[in-house]
Each structure stands twice: as C-alpha cells, then as structure tokens.
Amino acid sequence: MKVRLNMKAWRFYGFKDLRLDDIPVPTCRPGHVLVEPLCVQPSVTEAQLAMGIPTLAYDRVKHRLETEAPIQLFGHEFCARIIELGAGVSGYRIGDRIAARAKLPCGDCSLCNSERGTLCRKGPVIGFDQPGCFSEIALLPEISLVKVADNISDSEAACLQSLSDSVAAVETAQIQIGDTVVIFGQGSMGLECLQIARISGAGMVITVDVRDEACEVSKKLGADHALNAKQCDVLATILELTGTIGADVVFECAGGSPKQGLAGHETLLTAINAVRSGGKIVGVSWFGQPITLPIDLLRERSLRYVFPDISTRAHLAHTVRLVSSGRVSLKPTITHILNGIGAVPEAFEITANKGKYQAINPAQVMMRG
C-alpha cells in the first residue's frame, strides 16, 4: 500500500476565510489512531464561530486565529474509519467506524489523578484546540473514541456527539415519571431532548419553534403538542395545556444570535413564565453575551435554572445503544447531505442559516462523495 505524505484539509486564515490546503498527513502517535473521515457536520456553534459571531469559545478561537493562522478548526461531529493504530491502542481494529467525545481530559489535574478524568474541563477540545475532521485524514486520541454499531449509518453516526450532549442535558433535568416537559427550539438538540425526555419518563411533551418544518418533525418524533410561535400565543397555550400551573421542566434550546435566526434570550424569558413554581429550566443554548434575568422572580418562585453536565464517553456510548435500538431516531432530522470535501464551506453556510435553508440538523458532508 502506497504511503500518503500529503492530504487536503480545510484551514482557517481568519473568520470567514476558509481555504482547502495541501498539508502533511499527521503521524500516528502512541495512544492515537489515524482515521479517514466519512461524514462530518459543523455544529451550530462552529458555524457561528466561522462567521465571527460571538458564542462559546469565541475568545479562544479569535486568539488562535490572530496568533497561529492558518489553522485547522472545527469538525468534532463526525463518523470516521480507522486506518492506522498507534502503539498501545487496544480494543480497536483497522476498519472500525468510530465517533468521538470532543472534550478530552488534561491528565494532570486533581480530577484526572483521582480517576474522575471524565469530569475534567481543562483538557483540549477536538476541533477547537486540536484538529477535527474537516480533512482527508485525522489524528484522534483513543480515549475519546467509541465504536459505531453496524446498523447505524455514517450520516446518523455524525450526529452522535451532539446527541451525547442532549443525553447529558436530560440527565441533568432529573425528569420524574409523568412530568410535563416543554422544549423551546426544535433544531437537532431540541429534537434529541424531546426523544430522550420521552424515553426517560416524561408525560406530556410540548415543543415550540417558529418553523413549520421543525414542528412537523417534532410531531413525528413524539411531541404531544408542537406549537408554532408565529401562529399562537405560546405562553397562554402552555398554561392552558397545563391547567395554568406550567411545565415541570423546560428545556431552552432556541436562544442565541438573532443574526442566524435564533431567538436571542426571549425564549429564556418565556421559559421562566412557562415553568411551574419549583420547576426546572435547563439551559441548553449558548448566548454569546451577558443577558439580564429577573433574578428576584426566579427566587420568589423557587425556580431552578440549571445547565447540562459535561457529556462523557459513557454518554456517547449510550447514544450508540439508543440509536442502534431505535429508541432515538435521527434520520428525520437530517435534511441536507452534501458530497465531497469541497462542499465544506456550503455546509457551514447552511448550518449558520438553517431557517433560510429549511435545515433541521446541521448540513452534513460525505467526505468521499
């Protein structure tokens, strides 16, 4: 077999400046594998960062672009095939399809040294601090990997990393049997939270979006009521459906930059009024800037505004079981599939403007298409 010395990889020279370059193939290191990316999708966060819109990790990415460009960025949601094993790698074989956890332990903090490395937040993040999979070949650490079941497609497997964050969000909510759940936003994570909440014991599930196509998919995947916020008074309808009490748990998955068709922080303010006293609001969205909240109202009503725990490799492995068994369906959410590594910029454009393109899940790129 001929050894490749160079590969094509997308590199950022600055915000909005993405170029397909020829660069050396990475060397496989101990404890790592070389993979051939099969399907990759930019996350919504990555798509906003590519456009220079402040959100999670904006300052970190900006600093790297100013001091290190050109650099490989993003591409942490993917399915890939192993093509080379580094020294010490066990449990995997060449040809295995894998997905990966993006957040890696640092290996040196008190959590890592007490066998709690899955909770470490000091380590690098695939796609942000080290290259992701917008390239023909990528280097990944074994500690991040999980095998993909044979009955999960490459396209579905690229969604597993996002699904693992949704699993962590629902776990954080601690849903009780029969709880009424409201989910603002029916993009990929909102639809994932819907399905996981349903199989975790939720009773009535009410979803909210502003797009007909998102509401239709939501109903198909199990929502009892899918409300289009452009066609009804959402708060009044939720209170009517819950006997004026409000929901036990509300997931806020719609917030973020209005430039990309997101809701700013208006849905969070509505969520505060849509949850019952003593209930929980789970903050899934990233806002990219400080926001003003009615803290005294939260205190008066004993509301709990909580955030998802960090998703672990165990969460990712659980997503494989959920999708493989059919308990969670990803296919209806995948609306835009592009072919070939050259289509990556188009995937960023579609994902950054999902409403414009009627996309639900981020746009995917079949890298060998």
Image: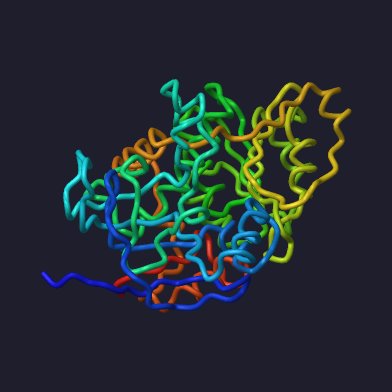
Q: Is residue 354 left or right of residue 161?
A: right
Q: Residue furthest left?
A: 1
Residue 362: x, y in percent?
A: 50, 62
Q: Is residue 263 left or right of residue 313?
A: right
Instruction: Please indicate, yes or no, whether residue 339 appears anywhere in the rendered image.
Output: no
Q: Nearer the viewer, residue 78 or 193?
A: 78
Residue 318: x, y in percent?
A: 36, 36
Tell me if residue 291 comes above or below residue 49 in the rendering: above
Q: Quadrant of residue 68?
A: bottom right
Instruction: Please indicate, yes or no, whether residue 12 appears anywhere in the rendered image.
Output: yes
Residue 281: x, y in percent?
A: 69, 33
Q: Is residue 301 left or right of residue 119?
A: right
The residue sitting at 40% across, 71% down in the picture is 9
Tell me if residue 169 comes above or below residue 260 in the rendering: above
Tell me if residue 137 comes above or below residue 255 in the rendering: below
Q: Nearer the viewer, residue 60 or 43?
A: 60
Residue 118: x, y in percent?
A: 45, 31
